[in-house]
Amino acid sequence: MSTRQAKGAAAEQLAADYLVQQGLSVIERNFRVKGGEIDLVCRDGKSTVFVEVRLRSRSDFGGAAASITAAKQARLILAARHWLVCHGERPCRFDCILFDGPDTHNIEWLRNAFSAD
C-alpha cells in the first residue's frame, strides 16, 4: 500500500469512527462498481447515507470540498443506484466528510452535500 493509499484508508477509518460517534452505523466500506465507488455506506435511522471521504493536505486547488466535482458526484450517484438496486430502495442522501490540511482531527461533515436529481 502506498503512502497516499495508507493516508486515505486512515482518513476513511477516522470518518467511520466519527459517524458512529454521531449515531450512524457503517454497513459497508469501499463499495465498487464499474464507473464508481462509495467510500462508506451508512445507516441513519431509516435512511441510507452514501459518504464520500476527502482528504487534502493542501488547499492550493480549493481544498477537499472543491475536489468533489460534478463528474465525481455522477460516479457516486451511479454507484449508489447500483447499491440501492442490490440492497433495496429506501430514502437516501449523499454526505461528505472533509479533512483539509495535515490535521486529520479537524473534521467537516456536510450532510446532504448534493442530490441525485
Image: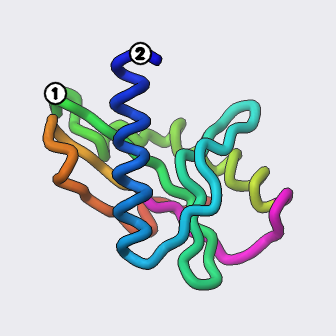
Q: Nearer the viewer, residue 24 or 101?
A: 24
Q: Residue at x 35, y 37 (%)?
A: 67
Q: Residue at x 79, y 71 (%)?
A: 89
- Looking at the rendered structure, the kind of residue marked 2 is Ser
Label 1 sits on residue? 60
Residue at the extreme bottom of the image, as rendered: 45
Label 2 sits on residue? 2
Where 77 falls versus 66 (above or below)? below
Secondary structure under the numbered disc 2 in the rendered image: loop
Counting from the top left corner in percent of width and height, residue 11 is at: 35, 42
Q: Nearer the viewer, residue 39 or 65?
A: 39
Q: Quadrant of residue 80?
A: bottom right
- Looking at the rendered structure, the kind of residue marked 1 is Asp
Spatial CA distance of label 2 from label 1 is 22 Å
Magenta run includes residue 58? no
Counting from the top left corner in percent of width and height, residue 90 is at: 73, 75
Looking at the rendered structure, which numbered label has been put on residue 74?
none
Q: Residue at x 64, y 54 (%)?
A: 28
- Mark 2 touching mark 1, by CB under 8 A? no
Q: Earlier in the sequence, mark 2 or mark 1?
A: 2
Q: Residues within 10 Å of mark 1 (few under 14, many from 20)?
A: few
- The answer to whether any part of residue 117 appears in the image is no
Left or right of 36 on screen, residue 9: left
Image: magenta residue range: 85-96
